[in-house]
Image (cartoon, grey):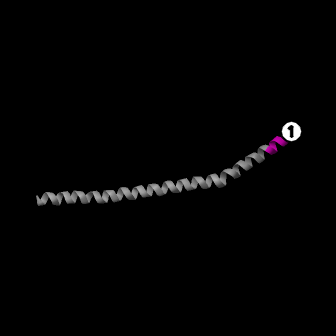
Amino acid sequence: MCQYNFLSLIKAWSIVPLAALIATLGSAFLSIMVFTIYLNYWFEITVLPIVSFFLSYVVDLLHQKVKY
């Protein structure tokens, strides 16, 4: 009986590092997701307006060249 309790204690303690590993991987995955969302937001705020402004400027120049 005592040996069985000891084995069940060992089995219970082997769950703890597994849970710690799962929590560590989960937090790392969450931080990577947050960083990716932040990079995507930064890209939308800075790069896309510049590109769209440049494209509209080029299209306007081409339209003026074709018109006159």
Residue 22, picture quadrant: bottom left
Residue 28, picture quadrant: bottom left
Magenta residue span:
60-67
User: At 73% across and 49% down in the image, what residue appears?
Assistant: 53
User: At 49% across and 53% down in the image, what residue appears?
Assistant: 33
Left or right: 1 in relation to 25: left
Q: Quadrant of the N terminus?
A: bottom left
Residue 25, picture quadrant: bottom left
* Residue 64 located within the stretch drawn in magenta: yes
10 Å crowding of disc 1: few (<14), some (14-19), many (20+): few
Residue pointed to by mark 1: 67
User: At 49% across and 56% down in the image, what residue appears?
Assistant: 32
Where is residue 45? Give x, y as percent: 64, 54
Magenta stretch: helix, strand or loop mostly:
helix
Type of the residue with mark 1: Lys
Against 62, residue 2 (above or below) is below
Q: Quadrant of the C terminus?
A: top right
Q: Residue furthest top?
A: 67
